[in-house]
Amino acid sequence: MRQARTVDEIIQGELKDEDSRNEYIRCAVEDFFENGDEIELLLAIRQVAISEVGLSALSAKIGISEDVLCNILTGKDDISLEIFRKILSALGYSLKLIRKP
């Protein structure tokens, strides 16, 4: 009998390559700016982090505990802009502000 997969396992299966991860993050950022859904953006970053480096390695790289990182990326703890920047940087992304026309 086939075991059911979790949502995380299904998403991870779709994020095997860099192009897929980039598109996933791009869509999450777009949704955030359209709908203001911060949790969806954080969960997308969490999925990319898991598929790219793992939460343990990411937490070590940015200097916070894995528990704190998990709480941040699931919306249980607040995130500072500095930690947000460190997470994005560790995953190879950056923030860029552009004035609307």
Image (cartoon, rainbow, N blue to C red):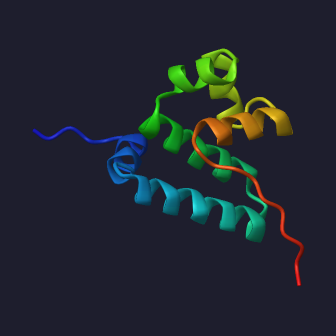
* Apparent side of residue 42 relative to residue 35 in the rendered image (left or right): left
Residue 19, by quadrant, is: bottom left
* Apparent side of residue 38 relative to residue 15 in the rendered image (left or right): right
Residue 6, by quadrant, is: top left
Residue shown at the point (83%, 34%) measured from the top left:
82
Residue shown at the point (67%, 67%) measured from the top left:
30
Evaluate whether residue 74 shows in this view: no
* Apparent side of residue 44 relative to residue 65 in the rendered image (left or right): left
Residue 14, by quadrant, is: bottom left
Q: Position of residue 2 (x, y in %)?
A: 14, 41
- Position of the C terminus, as image quadrant, is bottom right
Q: Residue furthest left?
A: 1
Tell how many labels.
0
Evaluate whether residue 2 shows in this view: yes
- Position of the N terminus, as image quadrant, is top left
Q: Nearer the viewer, residue 64 or 73?
A: 64
Q: On screen, 70 above or below 95?
A: above
Q: Residue furthest bottom?
A: 101
Q: Position of residue 94 (x, y in %)?
A: 70, 50
Q: On screen, 23 above or below 85?
A: below
Q: Position of residue 40 (x, y in %)?
A: 65, 52
Residue shown at the point (70%, 18%) measured from the top left:
64
Q: Nearer the viewer, residue 98 or 33?
A: 98
